[in-house]
Image (cartoon, grey):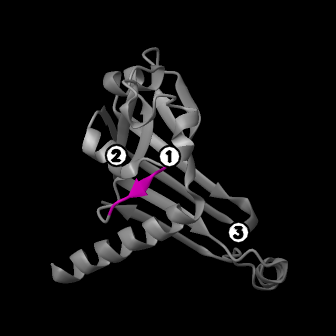
Amino acid sequence: MENAQNQNRGDVKALIEKIEEINTAMLSTVEPDGTIRSRPMRHLKVDESGAIYFFTGYNSGKTDEIKNDSHVNLSYAKPGDQLYVSVSGTAQVYRDQQQIDDLWNPFMKSWFPEGKEDPNIGILKVTVDQAEYWDSPSSAVVHLYGVVKAAITGEPARPGENKKINL
């Protein structure tokens, strides 16, 4: 049991490190008619449990979509480093002035002109259920080696790490 807990903590730590390298995700929600909609979001914090926090408009279309269906996906990509992360989880939107104060940075004023006291500012928290990442060396030489090796051995090239995480 302790081994599984240590493994889970290690998986969460690896996920956090990968996400923090990218920090902007495409957040996908489900509209009432079943249409999937995505938009870029810049995360503010990832806590030790793997929960991911964003600011959002408290009275927005995405908030309504999350209230209707809380299942979301976050897609992170850093193509130059061959790093890709997909996170599935549930979202909630709420107001907590202390947390808003703690997470606030001056750049947010572009979206919330009244600052930390803007009545439309909300916290969007994504609780991660599952995640998967692909992390490959970005070196062309490493990729070429993998392709050549695959051609010679007949086995598929595996030039990086791919891992599924269940929380």
Give how far apart the Cα atoms at labels 3 and 2 are. 33 Å
Q: Which residues are magenta?
A: 43-47
Q: Is residue 156 left or right of residue 30?
A: right
Q: Which element carries disc 2, helix, strand or loop?
A: helix
Tell me if residue 70 can be seen: yes
Q: For mark 3, what is the residue?
A: 81
Residue 101 is marked as: 2
Does the magenta stretch mainly form a helix, a strand or a loop?
Answer: loop
Answer above or below: position of 84 versus 155: above
Camera-nearest label, 1 or 2: 2
Find out whether residue 141 is within the magenta segment: no
Secondary element type, mark 1: strand
Indicate the amino acid at tag 1: Leu
* Left or right for 24, reference 139: left
Q: Looking at the image, which is closer to me, 143 or 21?
A: 21
Q: Are marks 3 and 2 in contact (CB under 8 Å)?
A: no
